[in-house]
């Protein structure tokens, strides 16, 4: 699995702690981890709305399987990611939330509240959250006897989102061009994306935007 961590401006100073906690779990599972948002407060500004756009490009392209993001409360980033096609993002505050989201909802992104109760020992809590998030294959069901209806609901939701959301290329072509360029024109994002892109149409359009 390829996982992207995307931090926005209000929590950029915590990126190192978040990244290291997530990296421990990814290393144990053999997952690849990429730090594609703000890595410090002096990086080029990134808002939680832009987090949603970056996450949607990565997931719709197929070069990233899962996105970990967040903001102060986690609410804004969760709403932003869910406004895009093919992205199903859960708000995760506890290890129990993480496990149940992975088993019942089987989404491809999570948003964490990095400003709520973030103090001494927070890196331990983060590690517990990530351990439970990736403890089992997604969609296993909880309780286990609910697996079939929960998986059916997930398929229904995916089909509904195809109707209620425009496709990613329509979004990229109609969204404000200055906003799009400001969002994608980031060295760590572009370096990763241009070397890992799977969808030529998306990649070519982004190249055109930044040139």
Image (spheres, helix red, strand yellow):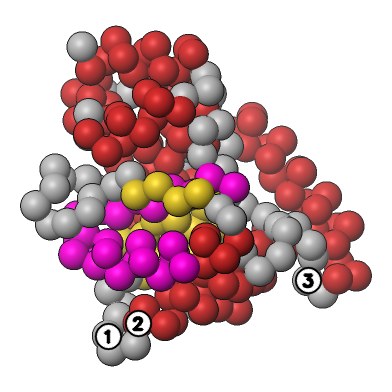
Magenta stretch: helix, strand or loop mostly: helix
Badge 3 element: loop
Mark sitting earlier along the chain (1/3): 1
Specify start and end residues of the magenta stretch as a single range. 1-24
Kindly identify which residue carries mark 3. 142
x, y (%) of residue 24?
47, 68
- The quarter of the image holding the C terminus is top left
Instruction: Please give the name of the residue rendered at 67% of the width and 55% of the height, measured from the top-left corner.
Output: 106
Residue 148 vertical position relative to residue 131 in the rendered view, above or below: above
| Residue that mark 2 sits on | 122
Give the CA separation, mark 1 to mark 2.
5 Å
Task: Judge from the rendering whether residue 147 lies leftward or rightward of residue 105; answer left or right.
Answer: right
State the CA–CA distance, disc 1 to disc 3. 31 Å
Horizontally, residue 71 falls left or right of residue 27, namely left
Can you see residue 31? yes
Q: Residues within 10 Å of mark 1 (few under 14, many from 20)?
A: few
Q: Residues within 10 Å of mark 2 (few under 14, many from 20)?
A: some
Give the residue pinned by disc 1. Answer: 119
Could you say which quadrant of the image residue 14 lies in?
Answer: bottom left
State which quadrant residue 62 falls in.
top right
Q: Secondary structure at mark 1?
A: loop
Q: Nearer the viewer, mark 1 or mark 3?
A: 1
Tell me the residue at 28%/73% (across/down). Answer: 115
Magenta segment includes 16: yes
Sequence-first tag of 3 and 2:
2
Is the residue under label 2 in contact with that under label 1 (CB below 8 Å)?
yes
Q: Whole-percent x and y of residue 39?
A: 22, 54
88 and 65: which is toward the camera: 65
């Amino acid at each position: 699995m390829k996982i992207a961590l995307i931090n926005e401006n209000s929590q950029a100073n915590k990126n190192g702690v978040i990244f290291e906690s997530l990296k421990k779990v990814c290393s144990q599972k053999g997952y690849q981890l990429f730090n594609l948002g703000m890595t410090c407060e002096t990086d080029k500004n990134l808002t939680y709305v832009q987090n949603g756009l970056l996450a949607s490009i990565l997931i719709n392209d197929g070069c990233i399987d899962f996105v970990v993001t967040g903001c102060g409360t986690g609410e804004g980033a969760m709403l932003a990611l869910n406004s895009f096609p093919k992205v199903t993002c859960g708000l995760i505050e506890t290890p129990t939330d993480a496990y149940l989201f992975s088993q019942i909802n089987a989404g491809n992104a999570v948003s964490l509240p990095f400003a709520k109760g973030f103090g001494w020992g927070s890196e331990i809590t983060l590690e517990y959250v990530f351990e439970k998030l990736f403890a089992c294959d997604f969609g296993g069901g909880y309780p286990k006897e609910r697996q079939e209806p929960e998986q059916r609901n997930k398929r229904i939701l995916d089909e509904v989102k195809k109707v209620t959301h425009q496709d990613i290329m329509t979004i990229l072509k109609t969204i404000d061009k200055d906003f799009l360029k400001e969002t994608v024109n980031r060295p760590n994002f572009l370096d990763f994306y241009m070397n890992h892109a799977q969808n030529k149409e998306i990649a070519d359009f982004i190249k055109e935007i930044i040139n």
